[in-house]
Image (cartoon, rainbow, N blue to C red):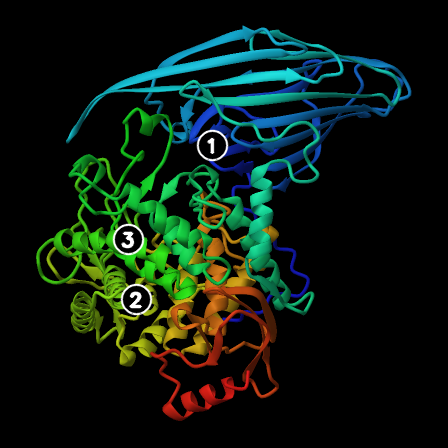
Amino acid sequence: MSLDRPLGSLARLRPRAGSLYISQNRTVLCMRPDGSIAPEPHIGLFVRNTRVLSLYRHLIDGRPPAPVAHSAVEQDSWLGYYIAPPPEGGDAAPRTVELRLSRFVGDGFHEDIDVASFTQERVRFTLALEIDADFADAAETDGPRLQRGDTRWALEPAEHGCELRCDYRAEHRYEHPGESGVARFDAGIIVRARSADSPPSCAGREIRFSIDLEPHGTWHGCVDVTALIRGEPLPLLAGCRSFFGARHARDVARGTFHHRATSFSVPGAGTLSHTVSCALDRAKRDLIALRMYDIDQDERTWTVAAGLPIYIGLFGRDPLAAGTQAAALTTDVLAGTALVLPRWQGRVVDDWRDEQPDRMLHQARDGALSELNYNPLGRTYASVTSTMFYAAAASELWHWTGDRERVGRLIEPALRAMRWIDEEGDLDGDGFYEYAPRSSASIQNQGWKDSDDAIVDADGSQVRPPIGTCEMQGFVFLSKLRLSELLFWFGRKDHARRLFDEALELRRRFNNTFWMPDARYFAMGLGPDKRQIRSIGSDPGLCLATGIVDQALAEPTAIRMFAADMFSGWGIRTLSADHPAFDPYSYHRGTVWPVDQGAIALGLARYGLHGHVALLCRAVFEAAALFDHHRLPECWSGHPRDAEHPFPALYPRANWPQAWSCSSVFAMLQAMLGLYPFAPLDLLLVDPVLPEWLPEITLSNLHVGTAVVALRFVRTEQGTTRFEVLERRGDLHVVRQPSPWSLTAGPAERIKDVLSSLRK
């Protein structure tokens, strides 16, 4: 398949085109395309996954104004222009009254309303704001309403303004295995009109302004929507005229992040190099936009929501994976996630939540349904990946920072997670690791691919748990290996040796058991009968990333993975297009996920398969060029890249932005540059192999341990890549050296690379 885009292509893709949304922290404002809010699926002001505003629209003398331009300004702000014919003066030119709405999201939202008349006559009209609130859980907006509560509206006295208050209270008597009782949920909103050039009035659930404008006159007013959770108001953060300058402490925190994080410079406007630069910059901005400020530990220790507009809450595997993949940008997310998760580590046996002692959290999401215990999402452990990957993530933080105090706090949680893996993760004692849900309300597939229909046999039939997927074995191998290394550094050498031996034995048995010689590929997993699940999917690519794959099997795995049925031209599909269950729109049976591509790229680089790295990275960055703002979504369809499909279709409910899609571009860059830090030894290994389409890139402000370095990488006319150290603050040895697992580097090349690095 050709990877060349047609000259002059106009293709532009925008996921969730039926809505517009801005966000901050745990608040998302989802609007219809015209900027209004109506009681429709996934439309409204959502605070902690509850819709506190289900109707919000402006009317001029009973008619909606016509939208003429609107856009998000930043992730937390939006601006819309509207026009309407003047209600009086029929001889005046039509549509010359402008309504401008400026919105800012904090933990509620603020709106500036500005009206300008461009007529030559006086105009009078009523501007009305219709309001309603249904307090639906986000999941209820497109499904059945489960909770029923009492809603009370009241007109509150307000000096120089008008204030509507709505309070909602619901309760639910529940009985689940291990839990029973009565849960209560309290929420509310206060809608306050203030700072208006004419006094507002309230009637029912409507705020009205009588506006009288002279020719070319203007009018201004403000509306604050404050959310109440358990009776407590949440901060708005923004006030009138907030578009310019730092508005609050979170703006300052974002500025600090951009100043500290790695920056990337790529020459070549109008080329794929320019796309790389734009994608890196967009991902950097999106990652900080997903920050969950309410669980910050300090300015360098924070975590992110999994994705917008749906996955708002504390997750386990998503920010662990995103933090690991984005470590070349910043270790803030990795540190913040690794340090907060032990607070949620399982303590009791609670089958309804899939909780067991020492098991790591899958997700903790607010919302009416979780607070009322209709579902276990307020605290659920229905994933094995968080637990199986945790020690590897802790080790990655050690490699990048060498921070003994911080990483030392992660060792006991990692050991407890390993205890769960060995005692509870191997369900039948055969030495491989499986999952099986303990709750009828939980996710059925609890591995990397966690949709209920993700794991299919070669004939297309669903495989039912217990299931041991191939990547699960890779995660356990990597965590045992990396935890062994950590324990060695922290003086626990006997335990370190035992884990190291266990990791090597798992790798040996894995390659013997999961390899399919006839397919020259690894099985997707082992089913409940211990037979291979012989479906061809992306899972073995994650095995490459963990290093569990024998060197002799790495290249055959890569070759099979890049066959036309697996490589769409825009990335590696989750399931082969030749499989009976393939569906290009299915969440895990045919789509292409950027997070998979980032992990696979690192795995390919690990084994020295640089040609495959370049092909994969080019495909994904060219996909990024198709999306608005060069922002990669959660996933896209698995259609082939050909003349009939010049761009991929969109997965209908893809999050955009998604944390681990943001991180994937940094993982791909790390793969192409061969960055391998080891901060405890003041060492950074590099093995750059830049492709033709990315001939030069400079990294500035790259942090390894306490050192900061700037590096430039340049592809030569001979096709090799040279690098130079432009700046170095602190002790750091930058050494050219291929991955220890490389299939393409011999002893002579390694010695030559080390000697050449000594001159840097």
Q: Is residue 299 above or below residue 329?
A: above
- The numbered mark at residue 543 is 2
**Mark carried by residue 42:** 1
Question: Hey, which residue is sitting farthest left in the picture?
Answer: 429
> Which badge, 1 or 2, comes first in the chain's sequence?
1
Q: CA distance from mark 3 to mark 2?
A: 13 Å
Q: Which mark is residue 438?
A: none
**Residue positioned most to the bottom:** 748
Amino acid type at mark 3 = Thr
Q: Secondary structure at mark 3?
A: helix
Q: CA distance from mark 3 to mark 1?
A: 28 Å
Q: Mark 3 = which residue?
A: 385
At label 1, which amino acid type do we have?
Answer: His
Q: Amino acid at mark 2?
A: Cys
User: Label 2 near label 3: C-beta < 8 Å?
Assistant: no
Report x, y in % for residue 476. 23, 61
Which secondary structure lies at badge 1? loop
